[in-house]
Amino acid sequence: MSHGFLLFLFFLIIAVSSITAKNGTSSASHRFLRSTSENDTVEKEPQNGSMFKIRTTVFFFIYGFLVLLAFIGFLVWRLRRSKFQAQKNSSALANIYNDMRDTGEPIPEDLKNCPLNDKLEYLPYKKQYEIADENLEKSTLLGKGNFGIVRKGLLKMADPKTEEEEKKRLTVALKSAANQYDIAQTSMLASELRLMCAIGRFPNVLALVGAVTVDLRKGKLLIVTEYVDCGDLHKYLKDHRDIFEDHLVVDKSEPNSYLTPLSSKRKTYMFKTENGEQENMINESLESLTTSDLLSFGLQIANGMQYLASIPMVHRDLALRNVLLKKNKTIRIADFGMARKYEDNTSYYRTKKTKDAPVPVRWMSPEAFYGMRFTQQSDVWSFGICLYELFTLGGLPYPDIQSEDVYTYMQSGRRCEQPDHCHVELYDLMKLCWQQKPELRPTFNVIVEYFMEHMKKSAKQLLDYVEEMLRVEADTQRKLDDWISTDRSITALEQEKSDSPNSISSMIERYRRSTIGDAPMKWRWFLFIFLYGLLIMLSVIACFLWKYYKSKRRSAPPNRRTEASDATSGGQEPTPDQMSLISNDSSILEEHLNNELDQKDCPENLKELPIHERIYYLSYNSKYEIDEKNLKKNNIFLGNGEFGMVYKDSLRKANGKNENDPSEWIDVAVKKCTSYFDREKVQMFYEELKIMCKIGRHPNVLALVGATTTKMGAKRTLIITELIEGKDLLEFLRKKKEEEKYVDKFVNSETGDSGYLLPNSSKRKKENNILDDNLDVISTFDLLSFAYQIANGMEYLAKIPLVHRDLALRNVLIKNNKIIRISDFGLSKRHLDNKEYYNPDETKLYDYRPRDIGSTELPICHVSPESFKSNKFTQKSDVWSFGVCLFEIFSLGKKPYEGQNKSTLIEYLDEGNRLKIPDNCHPDVANIMKLCWHSNPDIRPDFAMCKEYFESHLEKSARMLLTEIKQKLQNEAVEQEKLEDWIKKDGTLHNNAN
């Protein structure tokens, strides 16, 4: 369909509109004249009005038909345009495919010594890197830019020989185009793949594991590289500035020298002290950052760039943001500056010279900035800037200069100043790298030799350690060949003629071409119009249903809090509309819960997610079904929640024989749903039941006893849990502090040794315990017990996995024997009246509504900064909350951040401020608190580590206390197992009795 035809339709619509309007005007005038006649005034008016309606209807019908015809013409034009674009893309992909093939064409003599970037068109894709697509398992998204997507993945071994090798998985990074239909992106990705094939593998350069090129001619290309788990080096240095230990001191005899600090945590590396002695100085922990680490990083970057220069290869974008860090503190140079514009990165600046392509002006040499000429000598300049970043711990080059003034600043001969943590010899090396004339700058061979000579004089054992570490990394990279395919027949570059004409893929391709590619245009029109019309119709129906549902929701009466005396209707009879809503919601929810009984297995890609994110696949386990006849209602009101009330009732054994026997009865907590007019709350009530079924039983988690669902249609579903008659732990601790019934057993001597005041050996033998079950008095040992039990319970929840999202002492219950239960799993609470919760909408700090927890209220004093900002809750955000719980425990219920304005609390935390460690807190416990409050969630420990940390601390400081706690928890587990006696044994499923 041509543009001329569309223009013709447009003028035709205007002409018809004008004619119709003219006819309508003359008809109206005619009616006006006729209305002056006395005989026709009354009789003719209805007829003329009806004619006007008919003409108006015809006009809009014709007008709508022409608009529809024009729209169809536009769709046909777009379809033909898409076909032309598809043919163009197919041709471009074929060219990319052909360029990657190894044609055997030799590289011209004048290009052999040029960098790889200048002879890219002669670099082939090496088929030994091919990976079978079925051997890859894609996982979480690591990053997304304008040109590519990087995901974390798992790679199976290509040719496993044993069952153990069959189970092995290699963690890799998977890079693909952000839009596989974008030829430019696919071409850039293919060029990067060919470049990485030519680079090969080296300990300090990000290694190519392989690639998937089977569907390259369809625009699908996947690059598989090493997975480097600790992110870029620049971010690591900035995040760890507060723990940096500087070993550089000023000596009268020398300009600078290294000195070992008085730290006892170093294990394997030696630095010279003032007396010339040697002391152990290496620590591979990422929580340690010293001058020795900076020297190691600098040498490794120089080592990697020396290898790239020997290929030869020009990086063009060398900076610490493009240097990745592994857990063992080895680095990988990555991001070879092939095709990136970095539109969202503030490190890049758009200049007139580069037009629309931003460049890293603060890292570029003058000749590269002015003439866009990139050489190995311009990489040397960038290496000098990297050294500046290293020894300023991630500082910005030229911090006081605007990006547009950097070039003028460099041309004037001025350079970055010497960093505080930098040795004078290394600053001399920086100045050599920043020579104005490129030919005066050292090569990377000279730089590596310079570094090694410097370290031989000052840190010989560090140099030996780094060399040994790189040898181990080289061996690790050589083993990557075991993970890639040995069957080269699957390669896209080798399978051009290998597809059988009778294979499924060939038949599908032929069908696609016959039904779409070679079909007559008119059939394609009808197919496209039919599908588009169907989509519009479904959209209209969906909008109608949504509006209808919203109108029904608005027509429902608002939910009001009810009195404890009536848990169903607030003492009033429901209206007919309310009864209709109850009936509809009841049938829908019954069907929803019944369907879950036979739900299929959860998909593999969801099994590792927290259970509240896969609630659809959870089922109500019928073994928890309780006969309501065995429930004796005492109607002792315990509390009122957002969608339910809790009562204290009594439950009889399922197979009890004598109802007068007290041993056959236990007290339980019974929750009833009262918000029957709110569909969302009713559904959340049932979801809570399914989640508690999934959680099961654990000594430190509130256990589900059972439920009654047989009268669900009458809104009589009940959730029955253990009854904990004690208070929550926060109120309990505050009361003991107020009554001065806390005994401090923590001892902190003047020598710096810390410990606990344990009973003498004779008393321990006599009483055989340290803990006292008496609730009237508590001691430091009780606080340690509470902390350990919370870690123990959260470890269990994390294994399920379940993210609590509201971990705080107010949600921890304490029994009479000082055993705690974690409760209130943050799944359905709105906390409308709780001062511990903060509504960010009140100050308009954030414009999101965290629907995931049911309202805009957040427990701001306990929630992690990243969760408050993004409304994303993970196990690491629970770990932050656990650290706040430790503060509450050892401060005996003190309110966190007391006196701090809630509206500025997040900014307060972002500045690095944290809660003050309580005075009666052991340094070991203080350390775990600080780790839980680390700004980087990846660095925080998990709950298994927290529990292990407490066990290690108690094993060292109060072993008998640890033994007592474990024994009490074993007894609690036995007691919880006895709850099975109070639920049905026949396993019958619940009915749908209304």
Image: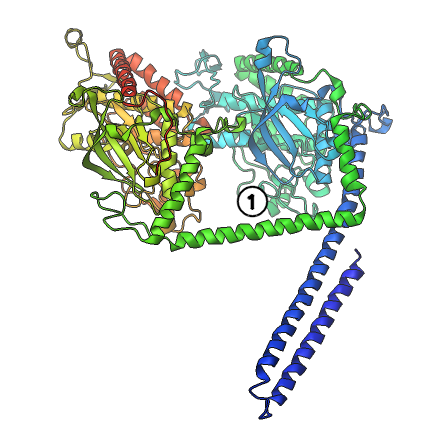
Relative to 582, 127 lies left or right: right
| Quadrant that contains the C terminus | top left
Relative to 318, 88 lies left or right: right
Pick the residue in front: 297 or 613: 613
Query: Which residue does the numbered mark 1 point to in the structure image?
Result: 401
Query: Which image quarter: residue 3?
Result: bottom right
Pick the residue in front: 332 or 237: 332
The x, y position of residue 142, in whole percent, is 56, 32
Q: Secondary structure at mark 1?
A: loop
Q: Residue at x 57, y 24 (%)?
A: 228
Query: Which image quarter: residue 892?
Result: top left
Q: Residue at the bottom extreme? A: 38
Q: Is residue 587 above or below residue 110?
A: below
Query: Which image quarter: residue 888?
Result: top left
Q: Is residue 409 above or below residue 752?
A: below
Callout 1: few (<14), some (14-19), or many (20+) C-alpha neighbours within 10 Å? few
| Quadrant that contains the N terminus | bottom right
Pick the residue in front: 76 or 170: 76
Relative to 487, 861 lies left or right: left
The x, y position of residue 378, in whole percent, is 68, 33
Relative to 758, 43 lies left or right: right
Q: Residue at x 52, y 19 (%)?
A: 328
Q: Is residue 880 visible?
A: no
Q: Amino acid at mark 1?
A: Ile
The x, y position of residue 582, in whole percent, is 36, 46
Count of labels shown?
A: 1
Q: Is residue 424 above or below residue 858?
A: above
Q: Is residue 414 visible?
A: yes
Colour convention: rainbow
The x, y position of residue 79, in whole percent, is 74, 49
